[in-house]
């Protein structure tokens, strides 16, 4: 997965560098490369964008609304996704709490955590003071 993403990144970078190079060449020389192909390419890209915009509407209108099984499946999938996201956030919160609370009788807290705690206390004091003044 990571290798695929890295390859896609490098191909994207190479494509952008190529496009910038072609544009620079066109601006320097005043010539337009592949001028006869550009209108057809514009039509194809325009129709692709329009199709991409209409596809979710088509799926929602004709597949989800007209098919009760698909509607129930989508609802269950969304519900499971929400429950999974909530579970993931809870796990992250527990991990964060475990990593930031000082251990009793264990190793001493690092200087960095002490500094962060002091900075947090200072910020909280200033917030309380500004609320009391209002």
Image (tube, helix red, strand yellow):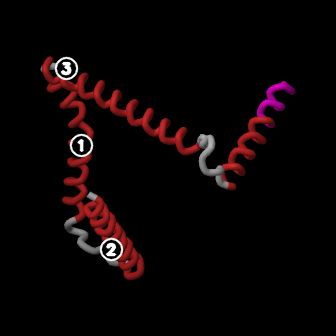
Label 2 CA crowd tier, 10 Å (few <14, some 14–19, many 20+): few
Q: Which residue is mark 1?
A: 52
Residue 132 is inside the magenta segment: yes
- Label whose residue precedes the other's in the sequence (1 or 3): 1
User: In 3D space, how far apart are the residues under numbered discs 2 and 3 (Cα atoms)?
Assistant: 47 Å
Residue at 15 percent across and 26 percent down: it is 63
| Location of mark 3 (residue) | 72
The alpha-carbon separation of the residues under discs 1 and 3 comes to 25 Å
Does the rendering let one see residue 109?
yes
Which is nearer the eye, 68 or 65? Answer: 68
Neighbours of disc 1 within 10 Å: few (<14), some (14-19), many (20+) = few
Q: Which residue is mark 2?
A: 18
Q: Is residue 87 above or below residue 16?
A: above
- Tag 1–tag 3 contact (CB < 8 Å): no
Q: Which mark is residue 86?
A: none
| Residue 1 in which image quadrant | bottom left
Find the distance from the CA under tag 2 to the CA under tag 1: 26 Å
Q: Identify the secondary structure beneath mark 3.
A: helix
Q: Which residues are magenta?
A: 126-134
Residue 57: % across, % down: 23, 31
Q: Quadrant of the C terminus?
A: top right
Looking at the image, tell me whether mark 2 or mark 1 is earlier in sequence order: 2
């Amino acid at each position: 997965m990571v290798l695929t993403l890295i390859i896609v990144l490098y191909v994207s970078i190479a494509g952008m560098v190529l496009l910038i190079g072609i544009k620079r060449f066109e601006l320097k020389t005043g010539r337009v490369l592949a001028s006869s192909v550009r209108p057809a390419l514009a039509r194809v890209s325009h129709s692709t964008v329009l199709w991409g915009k209409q596809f979710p509407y088509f799926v929602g209108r004709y597949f989800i609304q007209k098919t009760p099984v698909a509607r129930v499946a989508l609802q269950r999938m969304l519900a499971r996704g929400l429950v999974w996201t909530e579970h993931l956030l809870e796990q992250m919160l527990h991990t964060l709490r475990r990593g930031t609370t000082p251990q009793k009788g264990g190793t001493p807290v690092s200087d960095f955590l002490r500094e962060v705690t002091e900075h947090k206390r200072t910020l909280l004091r200033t917030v309380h003071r500004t609320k009391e003044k209002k």
